Amino acid sequence: PIPTSCFEENHLPSVLHQPDPMTPEAERQARRRTCRFIEEAGGQRCLRLPRVAIATATVFFHRFYAKQAFQEHDRFEVAMACLLLAGKTEESPKKLDFVIRECWKLRRKAQQQQLQNKLVSGGDSPNVGGMSPTNIMSSPSSSSGGDLHMKSDEFARLKERVLLLERVILHTIGFELSIDHPFKFLIDCAQG
């Protein structure tokens, strides 16, 4: 029998989703980009999570989207919930407000960079990540530095959404929070 953690990419929920299925290549690209986001958000510049917590968040993300479609849940909100949950699981919890603010700044910075690249290359439609150039540069819920105001409606919506997604992730992965990473075995082999 095939382990439940193995899956065929042509049978993933995002590829089979109707009415707008993704191609397996688009699914891989969405996974790669979001894993890069998790790496950067969890790293030393943002959340300062231990390496094992970042790896755990990535595993949670992959397991979640092995059973759920990308079209049904915003992948960046799922990534925030995975980082929050992995921090708790690996005994390095971060406050929800801090996770949201840091992830928001990172995502906003990436959107602005992508917008600049499009404008420099002469792209005709500079709509980036669902936000127009005007929205990215001057959102009422954020200051000019890219911070999200804690009293804004956007912040409250994100907070509720991330908390809901944390529960959805737990149910989707069957509350399987114990992850055996290869790091431990590699370190044992190197030291032994």
Image (spheres, rainbow, N blue to C red):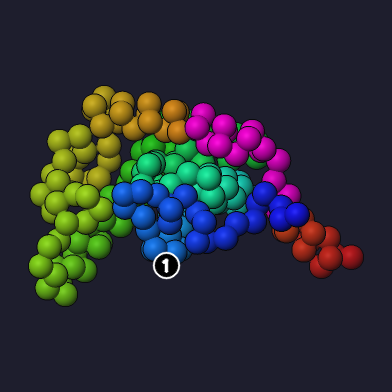
Q: Quadrant of the N terminus?
A: bottom right
The residue sitting at the bottom extreme is 121
Magenta stretch, residue numbers: 166-181
Q: Is residue 36 above or below residue 150?
A: below
Picture layout, residue 134 above or below residue 177: below
Label 1: which secondary element: helix
Residue indicated by mark 1: 25
Point out the image quarter for the C terminus. bottom right
Q: Residue at x 21, y 38 (%)?
A: 142
> Residue at the location (67% across, 37% down)?
176
Residue 42 screen position, x and y as percent: 50, 49
Residue 20 visible in rendering: yes
The image quadrant of residue 93 is: top right
Viewer-closest of 12 and 82? 12
User: Label 1: few (<14), some or many (≥20) within 10 Å?
Assistant: few
Residue 120 left/right relative to 12: left
In this view of the protein, which residue sits in the foreground, 181 or 150?
181
Estimate the x, y position of residue 165 in percent, counting from the top left.
45, 33
Residue 154 in the image: x percent, y percent?
26, 32
Closest to the observer, 67 or 184? 67
